[in-house]
Image: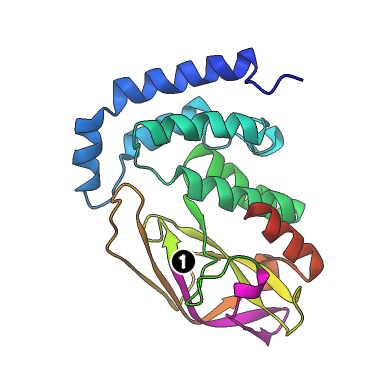
């Protein structure tokens, strides 16, 4: 069996490496981590044009339709150069929506994540710092066809850069009684702030929710299906 990368993936690696070496040497990394945004919007636009933001998303939603192994190639190279960007966050948010969203929800959010006009992130950790459904304590209060959320998510990657947060929350006491919802920056009751980090190329912060509504159109799914999709993204 061949456990190595395929020729197309090696070519992708060369392309990514050349872009990063040319556009973001270490001197540029140092400059960007001291900037308010923490990344370069020009770089972000170029990543979108190259198809790397939607690498694993279906072509029907503006993605490239490639595999997670292809994504690993890109992420290895961005890690090698300490490239500062919300690439991982946006990729994970897109994966959650692609795995669980309705056709309408996919068409609503995925093209923007793929073309760089939206930045997404997955807001999953809480004060207990536990991965998986057992770590979710934020509880949704039933409201119409959806829920309202009151609480915090901790150590959210790129929390200040994102304008779309995928948030898992609890709807009951059973292990799989969770749901995932999408919160957009335009929603009321949202606040966030950055936390000091040792690695300033990967920014994290707190997301606070004060009676934030997750309407039916923003609810990705609930129950065992949601728990399975959440586990897959983690």
The span shown in magenta is 133-154
Judge from the rendering whether residue 220 lies leftward or rightward of residue 42; answer left or right. right
Q: What is the x, y in percent for residue 99?
A: 72, 51
On screen, residue 189 above or below 182: below
Q: Is residue 135 magenta?
A: yes
- Where residue 59 appears, as percent x and y from the top left, is 68, 32
- Residue at 73 percent across and 56 percent down: it is 100
Quadrant for residue 43, please give it. top left
Q: Quadrant of the image for the N terminus?
A: top right
Q: Which residue sits at x=29%, y=59%? A: 197
Q: Which residue is mark 1?
A: 186
Residue depicted at x 76% and y 73%: 176
- Please tell me which residue lies in front, 56 or 198: 198
Picture quadrant of residue 130:
bottom right
**Given the current orientation, which residue lies at the most extreme front position?**
1
Q: Position of residue 222 (x, y in %)?
A: 75, 70
């Amino acid at each position: 069996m061949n456990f190595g990368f395929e020729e197309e993936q090696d070519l992708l690696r060369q392309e990514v490496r050349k872009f990063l070496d040319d556009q973001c040497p270490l001197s540029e990394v140092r400059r960007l981590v001291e900037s308010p945004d923490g990344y370069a919007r020009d770089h972000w636009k170029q990543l979108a044009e190259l198809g790397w933001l939607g690498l694993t998303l279906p072509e029907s939603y503006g993605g490239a339709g490639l595999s997670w192994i292809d994504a690993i190639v890109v992420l290895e190279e961005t890690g090698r150069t300490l490239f500062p960007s919300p690439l991982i966050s946006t990729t994970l948010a897109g994966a959650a929506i692609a795995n669980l969203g309705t056709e309408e929800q996919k068409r609503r959010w995925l093209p923007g994540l793929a073309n760089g006009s939206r930045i997404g992130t997955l807001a999953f950790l809480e004060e207990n710092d536990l991965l998986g459904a057992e770590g979710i304590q934020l509880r949704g209060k039933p409201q119409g066809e959806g829920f309202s959320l009151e609480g915090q998510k901790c150590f959210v990657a790129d929390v200040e850069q994102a304008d779309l947060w995928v948030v898992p929350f609890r709807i009951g006491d059973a292990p799989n009684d969770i749901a995932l919802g999408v919160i957009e920056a335009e929603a009321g009751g949202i606040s966030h702030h950055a936390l000091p980090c040792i690695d300033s190329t990967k920014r994290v912060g707190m997301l606070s929710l004060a009676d934030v509504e997750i309407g039916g159109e923003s609810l990705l799914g609930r129950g065992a299906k949601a728990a399975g999709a959440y586990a897959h993204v983690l």
